[in-house]
């Protein structure tokens, strides 16, 4: 970590020196060209002074141009982050910002946004799957109740058949009631104010019941 920062600062110093050399070299050639073009003859001091002043202005101009380019790029990245957050707020979790391969707070922010979008998408997929499963579990007993209730309208049914159909309707109604009760319990468990009543539980008995039900 420290070595990377050291080389990063070293690279910044190297770039600065390259800019200085470029600026003052360009200033020197420009002043020399003007001297040659207009046949000026001044002392070396004046020539060096003009070169230094022009080199300083060129250096400032180059630095200002680079800063504008960097700020423009940062503004574009900032706008991408804003657009991504707007999409997430609207329920679109298919967001994946380009990961910048450098260590700074902005990169950390992008990583957290990508992670948040990924987690929210997983939760949304689980929610959709849960809704699909619950809808199927509700639709199945409703179909049975509707079908057997329609069958009870026939007068040709025997008393035994009617009792059987009513028994099925009662069973499916209990199944719906239990499903509704489980959904209420699930909602209660997700609540922070859910009362927690700790008690002993016979796991061996539960496993035995499952085993008997499986081989029945």
Image: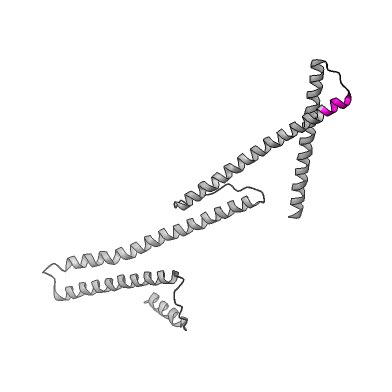
**Magenta-drawn stretch contains 140:** no
Q: In which quarter of the image is the N terminus?
A: bottom right
**What residue appears at the point 39 percent right and 79 percent down from the top-left corner?**
212
Instruction: Depth check: give the residue in front, 106 or 157.
Output: 106
Question: In the picture shown, does residue 132 fall above or below 215?
Answer: above
Q: Magenta residues: mostly which secondary structure?
A: helix
Q: In which quarter of the image is the C terminus?
A: bottom left
In which image quadrant can residue 191 be found?
Answer: bottom left
Question: In the picture shown, does residue 151 fall above or below 211?
Answer: above
Instruction: Depth check: give the residue in front, 41 or 89.
Output: 41
**Magenta-drawn stretch contains 46:** yes
Residue most toward the left? Answer: 155
Instruction: Depth check: give the residue in front, 6 or 160.
Output: 6
**What residue appears at the point 44 percent right and 60 percent down from the top-left corner?**
126
Q: Can residue 12 be seen in this view?
A: yes
**What residue appears at the point 44 percent right and 79 percent down from the top-left corner?**
207
At which x and y percent is residue 162? 17, 73
Q: Judge from the rendering whether residue 55 lies leftward or rightward of residue 131; answer left or right.
A: right
**What residue appears at the point 61 percent right and 43 percent down from the top-left corner?**
74
In which image quadrant can residue 165 be found?
Answer: bottom left
Magenta residues, as a range? 40-49
Instruction: Depth check: give the residue in front, 64 or 154.
Output: 64
In which image quadrant can residue 43 be found?
Answer: top right
Please, which colouring scheme is shown? one colour
At which x and y percent is residue 71? 63, 41
Q: Judge from the rendering whether residue 205 lies leftward or rightward of residue 160; answer left or right.
A: right
Q: Judge from the rendering whether residue 133 lies leftward or rightward of residue 155; answer left or right.
A: right
């Amino acid at each position: 970590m420290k070595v990377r920062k050291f080389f990063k600062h070293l690279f910044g110093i190297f770039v600065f020196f390259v800019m200085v050399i470029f600026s003052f070299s360009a200033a020197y050639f420009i002043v020399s060209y003007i001297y040659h073009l207009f046949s000026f003859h001044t002392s070396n001091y004046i020539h060096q002074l003009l070169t230094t002043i022009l080199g300083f202005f060129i250096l400032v101009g180059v630095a200002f141009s680079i800063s504008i380019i960097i700020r423009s790029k940062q503004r574009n990245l900032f706008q991408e982050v804003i657009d991504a957050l707007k999409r997430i707020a609207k329920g679109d979790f298919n967001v994946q910002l380009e990961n910048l391969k450098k260590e700074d707070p902005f990169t950390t922010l992008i990583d957290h946004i990508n992670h948040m979008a990924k987690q929210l998408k997983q939760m949304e997929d689980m929610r959709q799957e849960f809704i699909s499963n619950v809808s199927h579990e509700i639709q199945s007993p409703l179909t049975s109740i509707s079908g057997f209730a329609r069958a009870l309208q026939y007068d040709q049914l025997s008393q035994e058949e009617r009792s059987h159909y009513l028994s099925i309707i009662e069973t499916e109604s209990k199944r719906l009631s239990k499903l509704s009760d489980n959904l209420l319990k699930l909602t209660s468990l997700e609540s922070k104010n859910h009362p927690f009543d700790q008690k002993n539980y016979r796991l061996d008995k539960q496993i035995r019941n499952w085993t008997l039900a499986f081989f029945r």
